[in-house]
Image (spheres, helix red, strand yellow):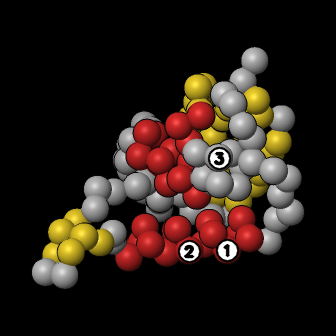
Amino acid sequence: MVELWFDIEPVPAPRARTGRYGQYYPPKYKQFQRDMSSEIGTLEWDEPLKGPVSVAITLLCKQPKNLTREYPCRGDVDNYSKGVLDALNGIAWVDDVQVTSLAVTKAYAPASERGSIKITYGTAD
């Protein structure tokens, strides 16, 4: 199993919006994509995995000043996972269609820390 840590605040993948000049994503998500690409580019990679892949994602979201909800992070875990899985296409695995097992957990990061993402993946057994 491979374990990766990214010191990036998780952002859920939104639906593409349609504007006058075609479809676009909100600036916050585009910045998340750039940050992930930048971090991924600094790592050394083997060949992308082929065949079934098992992935576990832990999302640590920055704590708000006032905790009004029992659950962390606005957004569904499936939307958070979409951005992370897409960022690793062609790098960790050939395509995220190979993911046969996916576990996503979201929690608050310790109060003094910003958000981060932990990814553990390997061939599915």
Q: Is residue 11 above or below residue 77?
A: below
| Alpha carbons under labels 1 and 3: distance apart | 19 Å
| Alpha carbons under labels 1 and 2: distance apart | 6 Å
Q: Is residue 108 visible?
A: no
Residues at circles 1 and 3 in contact by the CB criterion of under 8 Å? no
The residue mark sitting in front, 2 or 3, is 3
Sequence-wise, the earlier of marks 1 and 3 is 1
Local SS, label 2: helix
Local SS, label 1: helix
Q: Nearer the viewer, residue 66 or 18?
A: 18
* Residue where numbered disc 2 is placed: 34
Residue 71: give x, y in percent of width and height.
44, 38
* Residue where numbered disc 3 is placed: 94
Residues at circles 1 and 2 in contact by the CB criterion of under 8 Å? yes
Q: Nearer the viewer, residue 86 or 64?
A: 86
Left or right, residue 101 beside residue 91: left
Residue 81: give x, y in percent of width and height.
51, 45
Sequence-wise, the earlier of marks 2 and 3 is 2
| Alpha carbons under labels 2 and 3: distance apart | 20 Å
Q: Which mark is residue 96?
A: none
Give the residue at x 75% y 54%. 5
Left or right, residue 109 beside residue 46: left
Residue type, mark 3 in image: Val
The quarter of the image holding the N terminus is top right
* Residue where numbered disc 1 is placed: 38
Residue type, mark 1 in image: Ser
Q: Nearer the viewer, residue 114 or 112?
A: 114
Q: Quadrant of residue 112?
A: bottom right
Q: Is residue 103 above or below residue 37?
A: above
The quarter of the image holding the C terminus is top right
Q: Is residue 49 above or below residue 84?
A: above
